Image: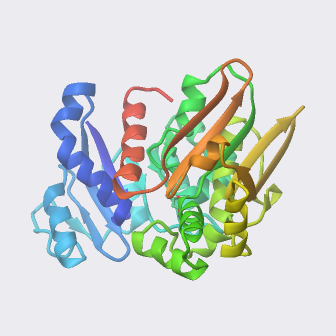
Amino acid sequence: MQKLALLGFGTVGQGLAEILAEKKAALKAETGWEGKIVAISDVMKGSIYDPDGLDIEKALHIVKRTGTLDDYPDSERLVRDLDSFDTIEQTNADTIVEVTFTDVKTGQPAIDHCKAAFRAGKHVVMSNKGPVALAYKELSQLAQQHGVRWGFEGTVMSGTPALRMPLTALAGNDIKEITGILNGTTNYMLLRMEEGLSYEEALEETQQLGYAEADPTSDVEGYDARYKIVILANTVMNSLLKVDDVQCEGITHLTPYDIKKAKSKGKRWKLIARVSNENGQIKASVKPEMLDETHPLASIQGVLNAVTFECDLAGTITLSGPGAGRTETGYSLLIDLLNIYRNHL
Ligand code: HSE
């Protein structure tokens, strides 16, 4: 029985909790895996810890109704108000699910959460991009030193296996280039602008749909896609790429006129993230590119994401799928948990 502590109980944390509540029996029957949430610590919603396991359906119901965990019933075992570090260090959880709101510029507090968890001998699964983009080498070495695992499938394309597929199913290939549409917000905006909306209207729509980052500058300036291409480069290509090494240009200067003009020529603007390995030299960029409508990535529309791996043995492999979403990102955490249990990558 894997004992989980959730740091953060927002959309993604609740998404995972819902999956665990709904699929508990099926997961046990199909995989043998059983997970129990023993603690939730959220800066805004409050913190609850029961060493025997929380009633997760009750916690979900209460948080949806009241916005906090204050009404979760007291018991002799229930401990309240543990902060994130106390939750890592003082609870009986063996795995930390890190889904806090992370500052993508510093990667904090998630980087320090990872360090504390690894030093305490606990696994971490997360969908926060900051720590993986900014501190992959240091954190993966620390996890290894302490004999624990670090899962972060959801950092790139949520539950679509953009990391695990190349690392497992495509193992043995020399991957020379990775190209992708890795940001759903901008891809959706480009579609809606092609359909006649202004930049501001298109951005507002993505915010209403919940795709955009808390600060959408990260989407429209390409920073979110830059984090993701760095994660792909460092995990799949085993490079030591830094965020600042990536040439980055967003979609802010593209006008509806540019988009319509491209369309009239049978072309389409896409925000393309790319990393290549030319004789050991790693080059990466994020920038709008005008693709021919027949290009495989040109047909990736709306919030859909896609990534193409140029493999020396398997050829050109493209994977497309959702890049965000409550259930999809919740699932990305589940697949990390299942693979820790199965002792797979
Ligand atoms: N804002 C991101 C996107 C969410 O639009 O793709 C997933 O990282």
Would you say 17 lies left or right of 119 here?
left
Would you say 81 lies left or right of 308 here?
left
Quarter in which the N terminus is drawn: top left
Would you say 181 lies left or right of 240 here?
left
Colour pattern of the rendering: rainbow
Outermost residue toward the front in this view = 264
- The spot of residue 170 in percent (x, y) is 60, 24
- Is residue 328 visible in the rendered image? The answer is yes
The residue depicted at 60 percent of the width and 56 percent of the height is 131
The residue depicted at 63 percent of the width and 75 percent of the height is 217
- The spot of residue 33 in percent (x, y) is 27, 32
In this view, 313 is above or below 132: above
In this view, 44 is above or below 273: below
Would you say 318 lies left or right of 149 here?
right
Report how many numbered discs are placed on residues in the image. 0
- The spot of residue 116 in percent (x, y) is 51, 55
- Is residue 255 visible in the rendered image? The answer is no
Image quarter of residue 222? bottom right
The residue depicted at 10 percent of the width and 62 percent of the height is 76
Q: Nearer the viewer, residue 25 or 206?
A: 206
Image quarter of residue 248? bottom right
The residue depicted at 60 percent of the width and 53 percent of the height is 182
